[in-house]
Image: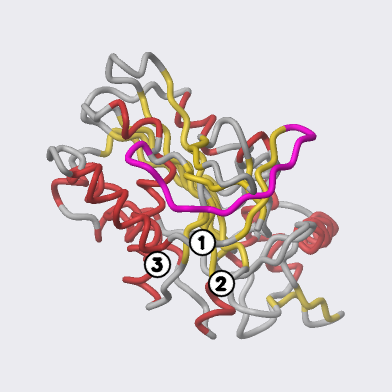
């Protein structure tokens, strides 16, 4: 953990904090506080600096509260938590949970206020200002249908959509295979990874990155955050609690014979590219076609310009619309 993240919880939005008092409290020098503030500003935290008065946050932030999250989880879910860790700064929450080796029936969960090597599909970087997003990875080892493992990003997209609706009232959309949208603005994404043999109860890692109170910078597409859509600061701890509850609910639904079928049907209700003209990208090759929903394996059905209909999977192609 970088030492500067010790400073962030001490900064206030309502009033200025003396640099000297901050330095004394943290046991560092006054210039160190100044350097830490400058670094936070570079990372996207807007801090007002006034000589003789000190430092003040330009707008409020919502820090993650581990105990608050645990207190609000249902008892049966709390009992599953082998590890629940909140990091101020981490390279990758997916990597962190994969190293912990989840045991059957037990969860390993890691979330971070800042993730400096976050990634999406095909290793694309995704980085947001500190204390502005929900970035969480959940490693589970459950008895799940093999089919469900191969379309996990769709299934847990349903969990995210449910959680956002429950906490903000926003009806978001899902773009095959793992993107979270509001209209044509990206809200985040899901990165699911398997550790072990799919036929032998592997570890499933569910990684979620969601723009909550600020949007990431340097992204080559329209993006949105929940705060802009709701007009208010969103409590990240409450949202994360809802996400964990809905992930648990989806895993329970998958224990029933028709669970996967129903979840994929629900995913289709959020599908934002169905009946739209799209481009399938595979390496340097682009194929124009129409999206026709998903099949019973979660693959995208498309209709090409020659009238042929076929299915593609998320490991093969990316989609632009």
- Taking the image as shown, residue 4 lies to the left or right of residue 132, namely right
Q: Secondary structure at mark 2?
A: loop
Q: Residue at x 14, y 46 (%)?
A: 76
- Taking the image as shown, residue 1 lies to the left or right of residue 53, namely left
Q: Residue at x 40, y 31 (%)?
A: 150
Q: Is residue 147 magenta?
A: no
Q: Main secondary structure of the magenta part?
A: strand
Quarter containing the C terminus:
bottom right
Measure the C-alpha gap from mark 1 to mark 3. 25 Å
Could you say where residue 183 lies in the image, as x and y percent from the top left? 56, 72
Residue 275 disc label: 1
| Magenta-tinted stretch | 283-297
How many residues crowd mark 1 within 10 Å: few (<14), some (14–19), many (20+)? some
Residue 183 disc label: 2
Kindly tell me whether residue 44 is visible in this rendering. yes
Could you say where residue 88 lies in the image, as x and y percent from the top left? 57, 49
Chain-order first, disc 1 or disc 2: 2
Kindly tell me whether residue 109 is visible in this rendering. no
Q: Are marks 2 and 3 in contact (CB under 8 Å)?
A: no
Chain-order first, disc 1 or disc 3: 3
Q: Are marks 1 and 2 in contact (CB under 8 Å)?
A: no
Quarter containing the N terminus:
top right
Front label number (2 vs 3)? 2
- Taking the image as shown, residue 179 lies to the left or right of residue 283, namely left
Residue 257 figure quarter: top left
- Taking the image as shown, residue 175 lies to the left or right of residue 19, namely left
Residue 164 disc label: 3
């Amino acid at each position: 953990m970088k030492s500067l993240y010790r400073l962030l919880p001490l900064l206030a939005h309502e009033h200025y904090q003396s640099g000297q008092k901050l330095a004394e409290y943290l046991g560092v020098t006054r210039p160190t506080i100044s350097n830490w503030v400058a670094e936070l500003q570079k990372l996207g935290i807007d801090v007002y600096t006034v000589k003789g008065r000190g430092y003040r946050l330009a707008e409020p932030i919502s820090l993650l509260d581990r105990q608050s999250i645990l207190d609000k989880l249902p008892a049966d879910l709390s009992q599953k938590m082998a590890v629940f860790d909140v990091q101020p700064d981490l390279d990758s929450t997916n990597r962190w949970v994969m190293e912990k080796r989840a045991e059957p029936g037990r969860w390993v969960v890691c979330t971070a206020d800042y993730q400096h090597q976050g990634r999406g599909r095909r290793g694309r970087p995704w980085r947001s200002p500190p204390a502005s997003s929900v970035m969480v990875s959940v490693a589970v080892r459950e008895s799940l249908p093999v089919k469900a493992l191969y379309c996990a990003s769709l299934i847990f997209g349903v969990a995210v959509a449910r959680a956002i609706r429950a906490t903000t009232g926003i009806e978001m959309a899902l773009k095959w295979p793992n993107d979270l949208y509001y209209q044509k603005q990206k809200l985040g994404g899901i990165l699911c990874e398997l550790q072990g043999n799919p036929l032998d109860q592997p570890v499933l890692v569910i990684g979620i990155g969601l723009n909550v109170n600020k949007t990431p910078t340097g992204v080559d597409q329209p993006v949105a955050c929940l705060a802009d859509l709701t007009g208010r600061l969103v409590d990240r701890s409450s949202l994360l609690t809802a996400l964990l509850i809905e992930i648990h609910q989806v895993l329970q639904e998958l224990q029933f014979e028709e669970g996967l079928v129903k979840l994929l049907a629900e995913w289709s209700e959020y599908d934002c590219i169905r009946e739209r003209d799209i481009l399938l990208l595979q390496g340097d090759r682009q194929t124009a076609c129409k999206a026709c929903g998903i099949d019973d394996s979660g693959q995208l059905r498309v209709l090409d310009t020659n009238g042929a209909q076929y299915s593609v999977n998320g490991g093969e192609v990316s989609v632009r619309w």
